[in-house]
Amino acid sequence: MSNKVYIAVSLDGYIADINGEINWLSMIPMTEELQSEFTNFMDGVDCLVMGRNTFETVKSFGEWPYDKKVFVASSSMKMIPNGYEEKIELLNASALEIVKSLNEKGYKNLYIDGGKTIQNFLKEGLIDELIISTIPIVLGGGRALFAEIPSPATFKLVGSKIISKLIVQTHYQKV
């Protein structure tokens, strides 16, 4: 069982700009190598857990990009939007309760996505792997990937590589 993060950040550690936008990510072309990395990652997870803000962002892309079950963790979202009934399931629970519930349903390798969701899982010590792709841009502000946690979370470096001569991807595992 493993709870994994796969996310892109700016050089200064932001996952969204000061307006909450991620359009700066489009500066990186989707190369075959980059797509292959993401596909390989997705092959190793059973489902996705994301927050409402991340769901709204993904929904704005137009075509739904996932063929795996997506669980949206939200206390404010009460109904699944039309057209997404077969794609998502709503969860209103703590990170620990989410992991326990999904593990009991047979989901063992979870892809955790979205700033606040990742932060909540980290606060409860529930992130096992971090795969962080650093994009060569300084945003100067925005939504940080990491926030204050009650105690340090220690990880070991598994590997680091340059992808498509454009980004540095660093892989960490929880100690």
Image: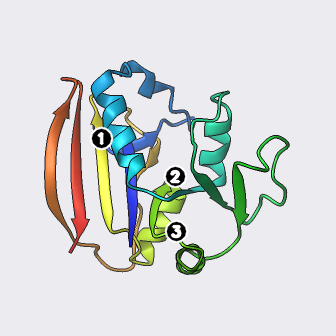
Q: Residue at x 42, y 47 (%)?
A: 42
Alpha-carbon span between mark 1 and mark 2 = 14 Å
**Mark 3 residue crowding within 10 angstroms, few (<14) / some (14–19) / many (20+):** some
Image mark for residue 107 = 3
SS at circle 1: strand
- The residue nearer to you, when weighing 104 against 54, is 104
SS at circle 3: loop
Left or right, 112 with reference to 5: right
Q: Is residue 9 visible?
A: no
- The residue nearer to you, when weighing 155 against 31, is 31
Q: Which amino acid type is shown beneath numbered disc 2? A: Gly
Alpha-carbon span between mark 1 and mark 3 = 25 Å
Q: Is residue 39 visible?
A: yes
**Mark 2 residue crowding within 10 angstroms, few (<14) / some (14–19) / many (20+):** many
Left or right, 70 with reference to 22: right
- Where is mark 1, residue-wise? 133
Q: Which is in the foreground here, disc 1 or disc 3?
A: 3
